[in-house]
Image (cartoon, rainbow, N blue to C red):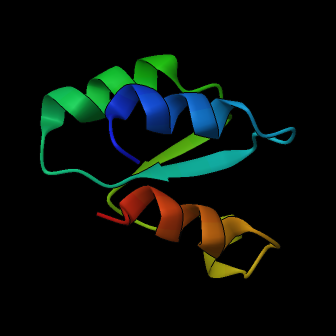
Amino acid sequence: MASLDEAIAAANSVEQRVSCSVYTGDAGHLIAAAQRLEFGLISANAPTVAASDGAPGASTALEEFTKG
């Protein structure tokens, strides 16, 4: 993703928003993302339960978000 705004918009566009992960070294970006993400569980710099369990699409979304 090119920006934090783009990443948040993409994340919030999915139908099921149970959990997500935010990977960043910037505490300000983490707080901003947590305030705007529409998920039940937000993990910081760690995989979510869904990602570690191999839920369909979880690792793809994570890879896309961290691609740079």
Q: Is residue 44 above or below residue 6?
A: below
Residue 13 or residue 54, whichever sits in front: 13
Q: Residue at x 85, y 42 (%)?
A: 16
Q: Is residue 64 above or below residue 39?
A: below
Q: Is residue 46 above or below residue 32?
A: below
The extreme right residue here reads 15
- Position of 16 with respect to 28 (left or right) is right
- Position of 9 with respect to 18 (left or right) is left
Q: Is residue 16 above or below residue 34?
A: below
* Number of numbered tags placed on the structure image: 0
Quadrant for the C terminus in the image: bottom left
Q: In the rendered image, which quarter is residue 38 located in?
A: top right
Q: Residue at x 16, y 27 (%)?
A: 28
- Position of 61 with respect to 32 (left or right) is right
Q: Percent position (x, y) of residue 66?
A: 37, 63
Q: In the rendered image, which quarter is residue 40 located in?
A: top right
Q: Residue at x 23, y 31 (%)?
A: 29
The extreme front residue here reads 2
Q: In the rendered image, which quarter is residue 2 located in?
A: top left
- Position of 1 with respect to 23 (left or right) is right
Residue 59 or residue 35, whichever sits in front: 59
Q: Percent position (x, y) of residue 60?
A: 63, 71
Q: Percent position (x, y) of residue 31?
A: 29, 26
